[in-house]
Image: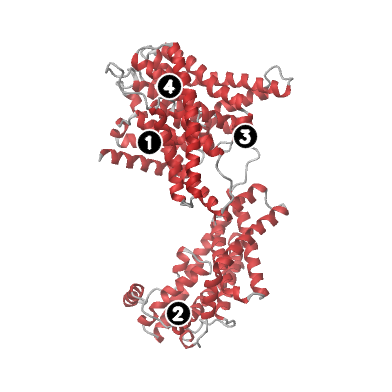
Amino acid sequence: MESFEFILIILACVIVASVAERLVRFVSLPLVQIATGLVAALLVPHVAAVHIDSELFLVMFIAPLLFNEARESSKRDLWNNLSSILSLAIGLVAITVLVVGFALNWMVPAIPLAAAFACAAALGPTDAAAVGALGAQVNLSKRQKTLLSGESLINDASGVVCFQFAIAAAVTGAFSAADAGITFLVLFFGGIAFGIVAGFAAFLLITFMRRRGFENNIVHVLYEVFTPFVVFLLAEQIHVSGILAVVAAGLVMARHTPRLTTTSQARLNLVSNSFWEIIVYLINGVVFVLLGMQLPQAMSPAVNGGYGPGPLLGVIVAVTFLVMLVRFVWLVATELFHRRKAAGDERTPTPQLLKDALVTTIAGPKGAVTLSIIFTIPLTVESGAAFPERGFIILVTAGVILLTLVIADLVLPRLAPNEQSGASEEDVKRAEIAVLRNTIDELNAKIAEGTHPEYEPATRVVLGSYRTRLVRAQIELGACGDAVGKLVRETLAVQQRRADELEREILEHTSAQSAAPYYTLLKSIRSTVGYYERGTNIGLRGGGLKGKLHRLRHQLNPGKISDEKAELMYYQTCLFAIELERVAIEYLEGIEAGPDESAAHAAGVLINEHRSIEQTLQERVGRTGEAPGANAGALFDSSQCTLSEQFKLSREYIDMITAASLSIELEKIGEMQGRELITEEISQKLRQNVYVL
């Protein structure tokens, strides 16, 4: 039960951090998650003392993270920058282990050299994904992005291998360079070879299943998620590197992922990407929350080796400085070699080269993988004694992770600002509104042409959904959206007051029991013409307690209604809805003529929507002219309207018209891009939204 409660606390922290990150946009998500874990540890102290088995932690967190990084990597970019990536992922990790390991042992003699090497090895991997979570925009070149992604993919594996060697030496107290070299080759190349074989085997199995017609997206995605765990465990069983095996398998499976040649493959990729996005987000969130939970222990002399906050902070700052200094020097040398090879005339570091190296240095903070690795330090050594300074090593590592994230968060946006920032959410929303309006105009034009009257009922239903999207987009748009949102609420209140007046008149002509079916019908009609959420509830309230009981009874037991009666009820309810639209238009026209420019602009936007809704309702019932609801008694005296054919045609063609409307929407996006009204980036985002729909 305690384990279950701990899991719930962790998940709650991840959820809280997700909400808090929306409120403090200037702070990156990893820092928010760390802060959330810290608060949780202060409120519930026992969570900081929970220990997760090292092997379980490794397979649960690192294996899926690396597999996903591999499957999403660009093989072409990795190959074109392979020498630089291997230099950073292997050479830099080895140098970092030696320099930081010796320095940490010298600063804190209580930490054995092998344990210090283990700490340094854990600090080798970078977390480039953390930079993507920064609250501010950062401008990185294509090569910098490729180096960071490729390095974080491979140096995770090299860091883990070095860490495992160092831990083995610390646990057993023995180390042989010759034996270590042979073991390293077996682990390294054996892991890669096994991963390639396992990746091909997994690919062949899924291909066989697909050819047999087993096209179940859920099973395929679960199979894909299941793969890294199986590959890791099998590789460890044959004593090769499970981490390298997972990376190799991920690269192989990503290489053989088919392009979008069928709709079933498109659906599969959509489900797979969404599922992996949730898994990776959850894993990163859990690890950073755990990091925050470890921080309060820094004040405990039993954990920090007797060091006070000052000396402990000094060690963390010194280790961070060394890690970043070694990385900076190595990157300068790597970039100098690359540019000499590419241009052949650059012999000394230039200011731009030094700046690029500094940006790439800071853009490689330590993150989830580093913390995942360091948590796998065993509790005891071979003799049964406690692992020397285990808690202190974890705290130093956690401190370095936190410090590198803070430096990246504060320095990168100023050192490499994104002067040509991408399209803002407001720009995309404005473009979406323009596209929706153009699409609505096109659909209205199709109706006006009258060449295919059989499509008209379904087209009007689709128009309702487009109006719903348009109103939502307008409400979400900046300052104007605030004005529109406020005016929408006021207009709904005006409609409700008129509905109350009509309801009192209606109840004079019929009983509450007879009027009960109209309540649900009015809500349904308003939802099909563009209203959503609160807007659909505006209308009949129920006529007191007795009326509400009749309404509830009708919802539970609608009873059988003849087709003729249903048509008449629909007709009468549409007349009621038309009256509400006319009241809204009259109110908005008064606002539009007022002195408040912002409110007047918002009123102008909404008037067009209400007029369009009124026209749709009028044409549904085949009636125009004076307000039919002005005299509520006319609702129940009106002649029967034949709507059966409209209902039938709407059901028959709704799917076809929906698909056609989405095609029109794509055409409008292309037209706006062609006229340079929107950028290519915005058009891509709008198209992605349409593809999802």
Residue at the farthest left position = 1
- Note whether residue 137 is visible: yes
* CA distance for labels 1 and 2: 56 Å
**Which is closer to the viewer, label 4 or label 1?**
4
Q: Which mark is residue 502?
A: 2
Instruction: Give the quadrant of the N terminus.
Output: top left
- Dot 4 amino acid type: Phe
- Mark 4 / mark 1, whichever is N-terminal: 1
Colouring convention used in this rendered image of the protein: secondary structure
The amino acid pointed to by label 2 is: Leu
**Which residue matches tag 3?**
76
Q: With 196 as the anchor, is 555 left or right in this view?
A: left
Amino acid residing under circle 3: Arg
Q: Which residue is mark 4?
A: 163
User: For this view, does 104 lie left or right of residue 549?
Assistant: right
Label 2 element class:
helix
Frontmost of labels 1 and 3 is 3
Mark number, residue 5: none
Three-letter amino acid code of the residue under disc 1: Gly
Q: Mark 3, mark 4: which one is toward the viewer?
A: 3
* Mark 1 / mark 2, whichever is N-terminal: 1
Q: Where 238 sits versus 693, above or below? A: above
Rendering quarter of residue 657:
bottom right
Residue 348 position in % (x across, y down): 69, 17
